[in-house]
Image (cartoon, rainbow, N blue to C red):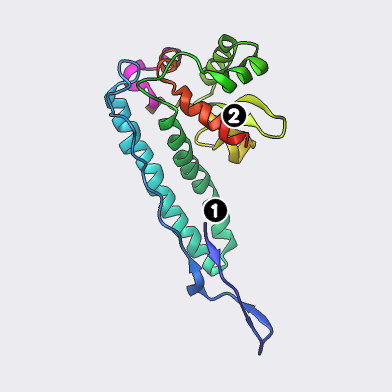
Amino acid sequence: RLLSVFFFSRSSAKLIAPLGCLVSRQKHTLPDLSYDYGALEPHINAEIMQLHHSKHHATYVNNLNVTEEKYKEALAKGDVTAQVSLQPALKFNGGGHINHTIFWTNLSPNGGGEPKGELMEAIKRDFGSFANFKEKLTAVSVGVQGSGWGWLGYNKEQGRLQIAACANQDPLQGTTGLIPLLGIDVWEHAYYLQYKNVRPDYLKAIWNVINWENVSSRYAACKK
């Protein structure tokens, strides 16, 4: 987040924003995985995980840092046109970083099965059954045209779970208001090397590595 410090000049009675008073925060970094690239096999192979994490996610991080630096310069100059022109890159690369950071924690070599406790009760309440929820999220994810994500989110205003799809790297909360709990990446780079163009096969397999402890923790946190 960028902060601009303003000073009040008594002599001129004007607000002055010195360019040197722009304070920048630390750059974004690629998060480490809590498991090896090959740990999700046979459901997601090591080559996909390595490329997805060390190349694709890393590119979003690098481009986000570059874009934020340009945005800081535009703010310092008061160049609104440049600020507006940088918004798509901020949304795309910022969303890519946000989405993947959640995605890695949503997966686990010890995953699969069904959730327990409050999350399971909420799923039954809002979708009828776990099987019905799984079918709906899979269908929404399969149906994403081109590239994007399928999401289970929490609607804080309504106090219920909700399924949504986002195009490209649009972040769920920033574009829909839903708090992200579980994201399924359906960009081709997430599965093509193993499943080719058969997205439904990838979506069938990924349920075997869903980290329900992580999803449940996210659900508990957003209800506080």
Mark 2 or mark 1: which comes first in sequence?
1
Question: Quadrant location of residue 207?
Answer: top left
Q: Nearer the viewer, residue 212 or 127?
A: 212
In this rendering, does residue 222 appear at all? yes
Estimate the x, y position of residue 26 in percent, counting from the top left: 41, 57
Question: Quadrant location of residue 221?
Answer: top right
Point out the stretch of residues depicted in magenta: 190-201
Q: Secondary structure at mark 2?
A: strand
Estimate the x, y position of residue 121 in percent, counting from the top left: 62, 17
Estimate the x, y position of residue 136 in percent, counting from the top left: 58, 15
The label on residue 185 is none
Residue on which disc 2 sits: 153
Distance CA(mark 2)–CA(mark 1): 30 Å
Q: Residue at x 36, y 37 (%)?
A: 56
Residue on which disc 1 sits: 85
Extreme front residue here?
117
**Circle 2 or circle 1, nearest the eye:** 2
Q: Residue at x 36, y 43 (%)?
A: 30
Q: Nearer the viewer, residue 126 or 79?
A: 126
Relative to 170, is 212 above or below?
above
Q: Answer whether residue 218 is magenta in the image.
A: no
Q: Secondary structure at mark 1?
A: helix
**What type is the residue that disc 1 sits on?**
Ser
